[in-house]
Image (cartoon, rainbow, N blue to C red):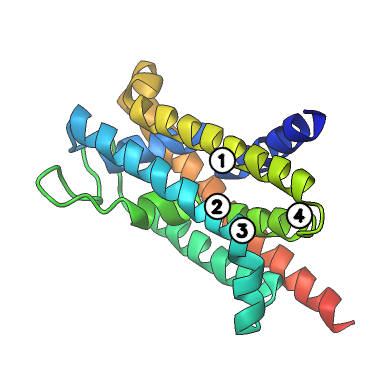
Amino acid sequence: MNDFVNAFFLIYAALFPIINPVGNAPIILSLTRGYTGHERSVLARRVAVNSFFLLLGSLLVGSHVLEFFGISLPVVRIGGGLVVTAFGWRLLNSGLNADNHEAGSGTQPLDTFYPFTMPLTVGPGSMSVAIALGSQRPSLVDLPHLAALGAAALAGLLALSITIYLCYRFAEKTVARLGSSGTNVLVRLSAFILLCIGIQIMWNGCTGLIALTR
């Protein structure tokens, strides 16, 4: 039981600050300003489901996929950091405001994967953490321990997905008290933080590559 609880909180606590659904909520709200409440609810649900399976895949087979293609984790961080940096820069200079957005309107099909799921919600940072956590799982010899950790990981990812859904679904109510000006400031600040996160991820990847070459 202790192993289950510890693994659950390890998964949730390790991924929540990187995914940061609370901080992403204003960006989601600004990008979906033209959508109805029902459409935003559908988007939040799909993003939560996509995030769950993307993180689960990274946790279970991410390290094996990288090994198969001969890709190191620092390279993934550099490439992913470039994607996050580019998206943060585009968002920072996009001219978004409370009444205008780039993501289209409710008349267009909902593309819930890019950029809502990746890289805005599940980016290279969270995927790298999930891959690192998955690579530390016990061997198949210790089946009871492995089953307990697997159940705890699923529960942690499920709780994280529910948190993502709630933050995105009720983003409008969360930031309603800020007003248009306050929302715009928060969106710009979140975009700048996202840009800095992308640069930090790239830097971590570069230092990792340097460490591997020594």
At mark 4, the secondary structure is loop
| Image location of residue 111, percent across then percent down | 26, 54
Q: Is residue 41 visible?
A: yes
| Image location of residue 11, percent across then percent down | 67, 41
Badge 3 density bin: few <14, some 14–19, many ≥20, Cα 10 Å: some
At mark 2, the secondary structure is helix
Furthest residue to the right? 214
Cα gap from disc 3 to disc 1, whole angstroms: 12 Å
Q: Are marks 3 and 1 in contact (CB under 8 Å)?
A: no
Q: Is residue 124 visible?
A: no
Determine the image quadrant of residue 93. bottom left
Q: Residue at x 64, y 53 (%)?
A: 130
Q: Is residue 199 left or right of residue 5?
A: left
Query: What number is the disc on residue 137?
Result: 4
Q: Give 105 or 159, whichever is nearer the viewer.
A: 159
Q: Amino acid at mark 4?
A: Arg
Badge 2 density bin: few <14, some 14–19, many ≥20, Cα 10 Å: many
Read off the residue under disc 1.
157
Q: Are marks 4 and 3 in contact (CB under 8 Å)?
A: no
Query: What number is the disc on residue 60?
Result: 3
Cα gap from disc 4 to disc 1, whole angstroms: 16 Å
Q: Are marks 2 and 1 in contact (CB under 8 Å)?
A: yes
Q: Residue at x 74, y 29 (%)?
A: 5
Q: Are marks 4 and 1 in contact (CB under 8 Å)?
A: no
Determine the image quadrant of residue 32. top left
Cα gap from disc 4 to disc 2, whole angstroms: 13 Å
Cα gap from disc 4 to disc 3, whole angstroms: 9 Å
Cα gap from disc 2 to disc 1, whole angstroms: 7 Å
| Lower position in the chain sequence, tag 4 or tag 2 | 2
Q: Amino acid at mark 1?
A: Leu
Q: Residue at x 70, y 68 (%)?
A: 205
